[in-house]
Image (tube, rainbow, N blue to C red):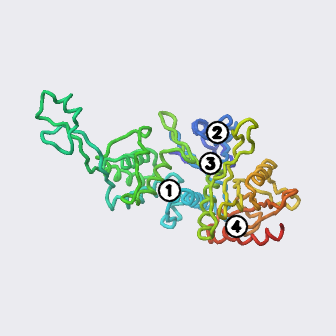
Amino acid sequence: MAAYTVREWDKLAYGEAVGQIPTRHADRLAGLAARSAFAGRGGSGVLEHGRYALRARGVVGILVAGDASLEILPKIDVATGETPDHQNAAIRKRLVHMLAIALDLKIDLGVITDLAWQRETLLEILIRIFCDKLTEALREGMPRRYVEREEDLPTLRGRLDITRQFTRHAVNPSRLACRFDLLSEDTPLNRIMKAAVVRLSRLSRRSANQQRLRELALVYADISDVPIPALRWDDVIIDRTNRSWQELFVMVRLFLQDRYQTTTGGPGQGTAMLFEMNALFEEYVGRLIGRALAGTGLTVSLQGGRLFCLSAQDSERGLFQTKPDILIRRGGTVTHVIDTKWKRISSRIDDPKQGVSQADVYQMMAYAQLYRAPRLTLLYPHHPGLGTDEVIHARHRITGHATILETASIDVANSKNMLDRIRQLLIGDDAMVDAIV
C-alpha cells in the first residue's frame, strides 16, 4: 500500500511527475474525505481537492482508500532543524498524547521506539497500543458474565418456561423448556472486542500488528461474530468485576464508533478515522484544567453552561443556546469562562487585535453578560513567535464593565510540567486580574 503524510493546512501535490502522488490515489482519498462526517462545505472539511494538489484542513487522522492511505497530522510546532521524518514522529507522539488525555487513557509513550514513531503511521501506532493493552488484559482472563439461556432439556435446569412448555412440548412432556443463567464469555463486551480485532486486521499493513491481531483472533474464536452496526454497545456494563477493561472499551469506541471521527466502510469506499482538532483541543485542555485544579476548591465543567441568549416574550422558550467550552466555578458561582480556539494568534507588534476574530470577541461578550464571570479567556495553541513559555498575551477590560477578557496560549508541543503551568495560568495570575480591575 502506498502511504502518504501531510500536515494540517499544507498541500500534497498530485499528478504523474516524480515526487507527486498518482492522480488515481488523490481522487480516491478526496472522494473518501468528501463522504466523511466532516465533509461540510462541498466536501472541503477534510481535504480541498484542488486542480493540482490536495490541501488538508482542520481535521487530522487517517484515510484509507483502495491501495493508498493518507495520514493528516496536526500543525504542531516541534524542533526545527530536524528532518521531516523526525518532525512527523514528534507530532505523532504529541497527537497520541492529546488523545490519551482527552480519552482518559493510560499510555506509556516511552515503550514505542523513536524509529517506530518515524516509520509507523498514527493508525498503526494506535493499533499497536490496542494490541498491547488487549494482550495484557487477556492474561488475567477474558471477562465473563451470566447470560440467560433457553434450552429444551430432559431434566429441569433453572426454571421452567411455562408458556414455551405448553406450546412447544404439550404432547412431548419428556422435554422441558428450561430457562437458566450461564456463566459465559460470549458477552456484548467480548463481541465488541472481537469486532475490533477483525476490523483492525483488515486495516493494518504492518506485519507485526497483523501477526498480533491473528493471535488475538484465535483467542476470540469461540465468541460470536457480530457485524459492527449490530453491536449492542448499551448492553456493556463496566463495573468492579471488569474495571480493567474500561480503557480498552474506550479505545474500541475510537476505532468503531463516531466520537471526534467518522468511520466509513463498504466496497470501494475505504475507511476514515478522523479527529476534528477544534474538538480534540477543547477536550484536551478541559481535561488538563480539571486535573490542574483538583483539590483547589474550584470545579470545572466542559460545555456545562447552556444558558440562552434570548427568551421569547410570550413563553419561557429560550433561543440561541450558549455552550462555553470550559466553566470554572467556586461553589455555585462562575469565576472564569474559557473558550479554546485551535488557530494561531498573531505575534506582530503592529496588530493590537492579535488576529483575534471579531466573532470570537462577540461570543465572549455574550458569555460575560450571561455568566457574570469576572474573567474570560480565549485560549490558543502556543507557537514560537509568542515566546518560550505559555503566557497571557493581552488583557482588556470589556467597555463599561469590570470584566477582563484575555488571550492566552498553551504549548501542546511540550508536556513537561504542564499541570503546574496551567495552574499558574489559572490561579497564579488572579492577583494581576484584581489589580487591573
Q: CA–CA distance between discs 3 and 1? A: 19 Å
Marks 3, 1: nearer the viewer? 3
Q: Earlier in the sequence, mark 4 or mark 3?
A: 3
Indicate which disc residue 15 carries.
2
Marks 1, 2: nearer the viewer? 1
Callout 3: SS = strand
Which quarter of the image is occupied by the C terminus? bottom right
Q: CA–CA distance between discs 1 and 2? A: 29 Å
Q: Which residue is mark 3?
A: 276
Q: Earlier in the sequence, mark 1 or mark 2?
A: 2
Callout 2: SS = loop
| Amino acid on which disc 2 is placed | Gly
Callout 1: SS = helix
- Is 16 situated above or below 116? above
Q: Which residue is mark 4?
A: 426
Marks 4, 3: nearer the viewer? 4
Q: On the rendered structure, is 154 left or right of 3?
A: left
Q: Position of residue 1 (x, y in %)?
A: 50, 45
Q: CA–CA distance between discs 2 and 4? A: 50 Å
The answer to the question of whether label 2 and label 4 lie on touching residues, with beta carbons closer than 8 A, is no
Q: Position of residue 11 (x, y in %)?
A: 68, 46
| Amino acid on which disc 4 is placed | Leu
Q: Earlier in the sequence, mark 4 or mark 1?
A: 1
